[in-house]
Amino acid sequence: MSKRIVDLSADDPGAVSAMIQYCYQLDYGDTRPDSNPALYSVVALRPHLDTYLLAERYGMPGLQKLAAQKFEKLAVAVLTTVGDEEEFLQAVKDLYAPLRRTRADELRRVAVKRCADHLGSAVLGIGKEVSGIVALMDEVPEFRSDLFEELGKRWK
């Protein structure tokens, strides 16, 4: 008889912890104790990305959805309130990394929508600096394609 053991030792420990907490509570704790999203460090985006990818790899759609929601909520805060987009841009690069084992389609959609919103605000003169997003479009052609597709849908 074969053992039914899943080895999680190579996976991100924080994501594994979030996955186990989700199995018992259908939620997982945010990475910071602050309850105000405007006070979050932008570094807190990465744990939601890792949790989403782990959930995708192990076929946990509920956890994927929750991680995507938490990622989106924090991304909005980062791009509008906090204003430091560097960690967000790094998260987008990580989403589009060519060696990624999963596609992370939902998180890609979230990131593209947030970037399109951010660009739209800048065009209207109410947004913050967008040079990072423009540079990212040069660095990651697949992201650029997804972003132009999203912008095209909005401008029809």
Image: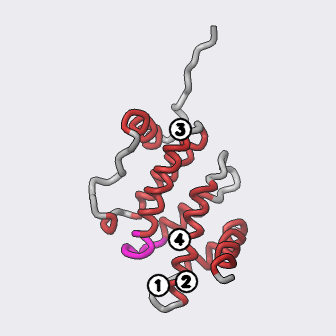
Q: Is residue 16 above or below residue 107?
A: above
In three-dimensional space, the C-alpha distance between marks 3 and 1, rounded to whole angstroms, equals 37 Å
Earlier-in-chain disc, 3 versus 2: 3
Q: Are marks 3 and 4 in contact (CB under 8 Å)?
A: no
Q: Is residue 153 above or below residue 22?
A: below
Disc 3 residue crowd, few under 14, some 14–19, many 20+, Cα 10 Å:
few
Element type where label 1 sits in the image: loop
Residue 70 is situated, as x and y percent measured from the top left of the image, at 43, 56
Q: Are marks 1 and 4 in contact (CB under 8 Å)?
A: no
Disc 1 residue crowd, few under 14, some 14–19, many 20+, Cα 10 Å:
some
Closer to us: 44 or 68: 68
Q: Which residue is mark 4?
A: 114
Q: Are marks 2 and 4 in contact (CB under 8 Å)?
A: no
* Closer to viewer: mark 3 or mark 1: 1
Residue 94 is situated, as x and y percent measured from the top left of the image, at 59, 58
Q: Is residue 139 visible?
A: no
Residue 143 is situated, as x and y percent measured from the top left of the image, at 67, 67
Q: Which residue is mark 3?
A: 11
Picture disc at residue 127 = 1
Earlier-in-chain disc, 1 versus 2: 2
In three-dimensional space, the C-alpha distance between marks 3 and 2, rounded to whole angstroms, equals 37 Å
Q: Is residue 68 left or right of residue 97?
A: left
Q: Which residue is mark 2?
A: 120
Q: Quadrant of the C terminus?
A: bottom right
